[in-house]
């Protein structure tokens, strides 16, 4: 590209977008890595630029998780694909009872993707990694021809260290256990839908995209015994509750009025005919604790966990026909349908 | 999809391809995982089906690497995207001096992708993981609408355990060190090009796609001190040698006639005007050892390492203007150009 004089518009056009050469492992890839990635994400491991990162020894058991992110649109109220990729992977480690430590970041970018958008995504990744106190230690960049992907897809794989004692797991749920949620539900799903379809809600629902570390740490600090924690992503809290009920052969009963839902999400759901219990969250988890722990867990989440809207939403009961039921009023219990899938694709 | 009677052809059509519902985290995703993924890749970690895998404690330092695979075509002589994804990640760990242990597998699949092709890829992944003695311990599946990806992309992230002493690294290369290669070069690049462009070579060049574990282990077993090992993927051995020469501020001199190249790759390169030194490999590495070690390293690779075509191809010399030179005949030394990128995209 050196054949273009410096002020030639063609040169600027070429410089403004990702090209196939940026993904082919040669000089242009190295330039992309040095000028855009290392300046934002750099740390002693990533700066080695070797094929693999050699990391400090761990005392606890390693915990590993991976997710690809194909969200559309890439930028939405409350976050973008970069924050989603970091927090999503961090949260999978957190709910498994681990201290998140390292992330491997793989990017598949479409030829012609604006470099400014890439910068924006990388800056979000850097900010989220700083907040979640994880390091991006290794990575990969592939560029595919126009039409062979839709903008940019990210895959983040996280490694954390197990903190003992870990939650005993959904199989150990039993009658009398209490179910909590850390905040208002459905924010992420509605935020994506509104951004994608240009729905002019006012105020615009914001994604809850964020780290669950503080919430999990607050439960540990308060000495609360936790049966299970799960970030309620695709399929929402309905999917989590169905899985837990099946694992433990119980029925989980939820009080509809106890579930925190913001007025904008409630309004959007009524308008669009959606159930907030089925909508995706990206920084909200469901927690199951023994009944006697509920009075310790709720203030721990609300205060130390910085989840002021955390609430007790139901309890574990003996198995009936329906794995999950919703209480509406004092007597009516309605079975909650299991989500077949997300109500709309590409939410994460 | 239950509205279709069992023998209805539409029902079969729907069952034969990946649908958006397979990627939405609900019942169809679970069916895909149980029927197609667990049956092939299952192990105690993956079967937990939790958001993250809790793994046994490690004694050595963890080593972590990630790569996305966007190869086109998906199936080629000598391998496919599945074998590539496993061996590519395994080899990045091996050349870093690690014992490969666990792999996280993330798949981005296009709506309409044939389930039989997915089965074929998963079967390849299973076979490669068995050969390389790694476990697929966690994963993710996303399905994007038609046109938002090209068939299937895989991202594999590997974690291994460092074996002490690790190679001292490319910065430690010095005058008199000897450069070896473990086998004939350019096989993968030519195999992909021939398959993509339907070039009717006879015999068809086969990709070298495979694990480098035996080669690295043979060097260790023979007690050979290794300065650096690197699998020569995008940019071929030229890219590796340029990086090493720059890291160590030396010039690396290669004897053209010593470099093993199969007759079919040589023929294809002459026909297409390509230099095998720039072509990608996926199971061939370059090794730098101190001069006095060469006589131990070569037989170790050829016998214990099962690399019968391994060869000494050059040595490290004092820094001159060109970082890498190729000797042609007794006196002529020609500077080797640094690859700008791969000569063609989507080779891995």
Image: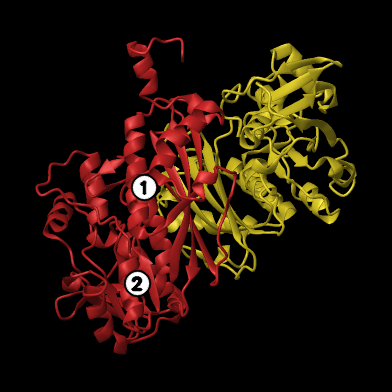
Chain colours: A red, B yellow
User: What secondary structure is marked by label 1?
Assistant: helix
**How many numbered badges does the structure rendering display?**
2
Please say whether residue B16 is visible from this viewpoint.
no
Query: How far across and down, in percent of the image, does residue A79 sit?
Result: 27, 48
Query: How far across and down, in percent of the image, does residue B138 sit?
Result: 54, 58
Residue A36 is left or right of residue B184, and the answer is left
| Marking on residue A216 | 2
Query: How far across and down, in percent of the image, does residue B90 sit?
Result: 66, 49
| Local crowd size for mark 2, using a 10 Å CA cut-off: few (<14), some (14–19), many (≥20) | many
The numbered mark, 1 or 2, whose residue comes first in the sequence reads 1
Residue B153 is left or right of residue A293, and the answer is right
Q: Mark 1 against mark 2, which lies toward the viewer?
A: 1
Residue A316 is left or right of residue A274, and the answer is right
Residue at x 36% of width, y 86% of height? A175
| Marking on residue B43 | none
Residue at x 65% of width, y 50% of height? B93
Please say whether residue A185 is visible from this viewpoint.
yes
In the rendered structure, the residue with mark 1 lies on which chain?
A
Residue corresponding to mark 1 = A125
Residue at x 77% of width, y 23% of height? B265
Q: Vertically, is B114 above or below B194?
A: below
Marks 1/2: CA–CA distance: 22 Å
Asked whether the residues under marks 1 and 2 belong to the same chain, the reply is yes
**Where, by quadrant of the figure, is residue B84 drawn?**
top right
In the rendered structure, the residue with mark 2 lies on which chain?
A
| Local crowd size for mark 1, using a 10 Å CA cut-off: few (<14), some (14–19), many (≥20) | many
User: What secondary structure is marked by label 2?
Assistant: helix
């Amino acid at each position: 590209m050196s054949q273009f004089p410096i002020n030639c518009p063609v040169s600027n056009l070429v410089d403004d977008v990702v090209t196939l050469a940026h993904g082919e492992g040669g000089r242009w890839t190295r330039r992309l890595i040095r000028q855009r990635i290392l300046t934002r994400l750099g740390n002693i491991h990533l700066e080695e630029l070797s094929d693999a990162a050699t990391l400090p020894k761990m005392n606890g058991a390693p915990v590993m998780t991976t997710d690809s992110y194909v969200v559309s649109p890439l930028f939405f109220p409350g976050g973008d694909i970069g924050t989603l990729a970091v927090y999503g992977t961090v949260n999978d480690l957190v709910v498994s009872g681990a201290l998140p430590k390292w992330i491997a970041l793989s990017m598949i970018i479409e030829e012609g993707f604006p470099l400014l958008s890439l910068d924006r995504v990388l800056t979000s990744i850097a900010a989220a990694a700083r907040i979640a106190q994880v390091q991006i230690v290794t990575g990969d960049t592939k560029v595919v021809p126009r039409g062979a992907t839709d903008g940019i897809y990210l895959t983040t794989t996280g490694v954390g260290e197990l903190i003992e004692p870990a939650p005993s797991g959904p199989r150990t749920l039993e009658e009398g256990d209490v179910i909590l949620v850390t905040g208002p539900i459905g924010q992420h799903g509605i935020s994506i839908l509104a951004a994608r379809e240009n729905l002019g809600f006012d105020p615009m629902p914001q994604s809850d995209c964020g780290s669950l570390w503080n919430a999990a740490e607050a439960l540990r600090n308060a000495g609360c015994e936790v049966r299970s924690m799960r970030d309620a992503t695709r399929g929402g809290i309905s999917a989590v509750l169905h899985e837990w009920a099946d694992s433990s052969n119980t029925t989980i009963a939820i009080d509809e009025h106890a579930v925190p839902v913001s007025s904008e999400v409630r309004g959007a759901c009524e308008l669009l005919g959606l159930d907030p219990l089925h909508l995706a969250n990206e920084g909200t988890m469901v927690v199951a604790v023994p009944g006697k722990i509920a009075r310790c867990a709720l203030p721990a989440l609300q205060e130390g966990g910085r989840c002021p809207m955390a609430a007790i939403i139901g309890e574990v009961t003996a198995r009936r026909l329906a794995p999950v039921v919703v209480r509406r009023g004092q007597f009516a219990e309605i079975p909650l349908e299991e989500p077949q899938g997300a109500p709309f694709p590409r939410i994460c």
